Image (cartoon, grey):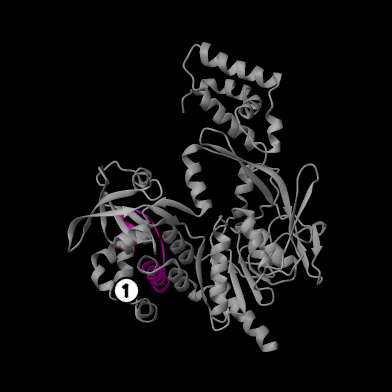
């Protein structure tokens, strides 16, 4: 930062006023612009900051004062009103748009070189002949290998304007170095991780976030499942932290009849905005199961709440996160932005599922640890509910507000050391790098295996599993596992499938012994036996 701790009193002194100062720098085209009209208080603050900038005895970065002040102001509002600095906003925006302009490869920075893991299907690099295992050495005149190159820096050299062309110098084993031209294009960031049939009549779809493209991806997946014979749908929202509300509303509309309330919002003025289903839904009669866990939040909870409160399907899993606040993003003109909470949302029965945050952000975000300690992750009986927050669905089912969606059917968390550790190693990327090295050494062999053959017949050897354990220990990652081999082999095979084929196959393999999916299939069989 461009200031010393000795200036902290000055920063604190400006804390309240700087927020107003920021307003005078904003260019709003909506009715809220009147909030930022000029007045004496803002002029007073402008003069103070200019005075500091021109006359203060030491050099001081007034932009840094404003940034810190914004953070301090927002910290005192609620946990989800946040400041997003310029260096983070671009990545977040791309993620929520659902695509970016680039060459369409996923890669590792492996031994100081860009090593292609795989190409995006139908993307620019695949069309140009780039293959998994290729090393990209140069982009136009920019060298992309050697020490000191950051991942962000590399990505910037591969991105560019849509339809612009970049000359790549590529090394491929067995071929050597060659040149290839790639025409940059839109590269999708998939929010639907998987869509496949669990059995002859139950379809499964997993969504990792709610972005601008999510509903389109979801609709495509649902139609494919219906065409494959699905008359029951499992919507997996585990670990889905939310995103845009609009896709969640459209998804819920697919399952709800015309004019059914999906959710409503209320702002500080008491203005209520209702959101109703339309007659556009294509799956209004089939059974639906929604999978949630303690990391399912925001738009995920809107969807789950709409299904539960309208007696439309079963919610399976564990109590969701408990985020019932709605934010609006406002650009600050320098590449940064603020997300400000503007209203609360309520499920159709009228319940707010926002968990308390009166004791500060630290306790709010550490609430997961309390759930872990009190046994809630293993037992539904440990979930604390308040009778004052009891609501009834149209069919008389009791539901509760005050902190997340409580599932209709509880499934405890796998808290064994094996499950937790392997999940961490998979998410951290350590397993992905190990698998990449294995595939890279035997690329010709693995390229001869079809997807069907891989699913049915390929088995991860004990040697490969033990090799991974040595690989991990060689990186000074301390793990303590017993009786882990079969579970480890499953994770390795899933990761290999991801790199060789798709995320879809990765999820299929990991889901083979999934407790929640087993529970859903059990519920489905039981229901069909009764009917």
The stretch drawn in magenta includes residue 18: no
Task: Describe residue 179's horizontal placement relative to residue 497 as left or right.
Answer: left
Residue density around tag 1, few if under 14, some if 14–19, many if 20 or more, within 10 Å: few
Provide residue 475's location: percent of width, then percent of height: 32, 54
Residue located farthest toward the front when viewing the structure as drawn: 163
- Tell me where residue 528 sits by quadrant: bottom right
Pointer 1 residue: 462
Chief SS of the magenta region: helix
Task: Please tell me whether mark 1 sits on a helix, a strand or a loop.
Answer: helix
**Which quarter of the image is occupied by the C terminus?**
bottom right
Give whichever of 484, 131 is nearer the camera.
Answer: 131
- Tell me where residue 34 sits by quadrant: top right
Residue at x 56%, y 82% (from the top left corner): 229
Q: Is residue 190 above or below residue 153?
A: below
Task: Describe residue 166's horizontal placement relative to residue 289 as left or right.
Answer: left
Residues rendered magenta in the picture: 469-496
- Tell me where residue 216 sits by quadrant: bottom right
Task: Describe residue 275's horizontal placement relative to residue 245 as left or right.
Answer: right
Provide residue 240's location: percent of width, then percent of height: 57, 59
Residue at x 33%, y 64% (from the top left corner): 435
Q: Is residue 16 above or below residue 520?
A: above
């Amino acid at each position: 930062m461009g200031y010393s701790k000795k200036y902290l009193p000055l920063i604190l002194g400006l804390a309240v006023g700087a927020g107003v100062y920021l307003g005078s720098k904003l260019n709003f085209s909506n009715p809220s612009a009147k909030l930022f009209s000029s007045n004496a208080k803002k002029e007073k603050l402008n003069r103070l900051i200019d005075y500091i900038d021109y006359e203060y005895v030491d050099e001081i970065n007034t932009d840094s004062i404003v940034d810190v002040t914004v953070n301090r102001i927002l910290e005192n509002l609620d946990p989800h009103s946040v400041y997003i600095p310029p260096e983070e906003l671009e990545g977040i925006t791309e993620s929520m748009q659902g695509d970016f302009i680039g060459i369409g490869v996923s890669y590792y920075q492996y031994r100081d070189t860009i090593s292609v893991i795989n190409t995006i299907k139908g993307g620019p690099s695949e069309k140009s002949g780039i293959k998994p295992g290729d090393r990209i050495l140069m982009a136009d005149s920019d060298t992309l290998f050697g020490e000191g190159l950051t991942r962000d820096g590399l990505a910037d050299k591969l991105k560019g304007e849509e339809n612009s062309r970049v000359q790549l110098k590529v090394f491929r084993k067995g071929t050597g170095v060659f040149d290839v031209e790639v025409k940059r294009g839109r590269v999708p960031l998939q929010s639907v991780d998987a869509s496949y049939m669990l059995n002859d009549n139950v379809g499964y779809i997993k969504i990792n976030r709610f972005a601008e493209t999510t509903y389109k991806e979801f609709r495509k997946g649902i139609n494919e499942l219906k065409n494959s014979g699905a008359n029951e749908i499992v919507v997996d929202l585990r670990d889905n932290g939310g995103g845009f509300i609009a896709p969640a509303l459209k998804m819920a509309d697919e399952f709800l009849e015309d004019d059914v309330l999906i959710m409503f919002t209320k702002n500080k003025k008491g203005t209520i905005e209702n959101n109703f289903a339309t007659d556009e839904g294509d799956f209004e009669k089939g059974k639906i199961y929604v999978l949630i866990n303690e990391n399912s939040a925001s738009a995920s909870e809107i969807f789950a709440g709409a299904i539960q409160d309208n007696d439309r399907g079963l919610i399976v899993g564990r109590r969701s996160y408990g985020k019932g606040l709605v934010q609006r993003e406002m650009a600050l003109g320098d590449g940064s932005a603020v997300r400000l909470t503007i209203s609360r949302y309520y499920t159709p029965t009228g319940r707010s599922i926002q968990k308390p945050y009166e004791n500060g952000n630290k306790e709010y975000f550490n609430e997961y640890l309390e759930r872990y300690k009190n046994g809630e992750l293993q037992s539904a009986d440990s979930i604390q509910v308040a009778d004052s927050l009891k609501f009834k669905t149209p069919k008389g089912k009791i539901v509760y507000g005050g902190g997340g969606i409580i599932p209709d059917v509880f499934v405890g968390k796998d808290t064994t050391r094996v499950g937790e550790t392997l999940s961490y190693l998979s998410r951290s990327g350590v397993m992905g790098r190990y698998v990449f090295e294995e595939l890279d050494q035997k690329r010709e062999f693995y390229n001869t295996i079809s997807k069907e053959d891989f699913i049915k017949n390929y088995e991860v050897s004990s040697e490969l599993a033990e090799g991974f354990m040595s690989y991990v220990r060689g990186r000074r990652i301390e793990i303590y596992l017993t009786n882990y081999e079969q579970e480890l082999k499953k994770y390795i095979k899933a990761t290999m499938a991801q790199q060789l084929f798709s995320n879809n196959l990765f999820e299929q393999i990991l889901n083979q012994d999934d407790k929640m999916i087993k529970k859903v299939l059990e519920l489905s069989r039981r229901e069909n036996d009764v009917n």
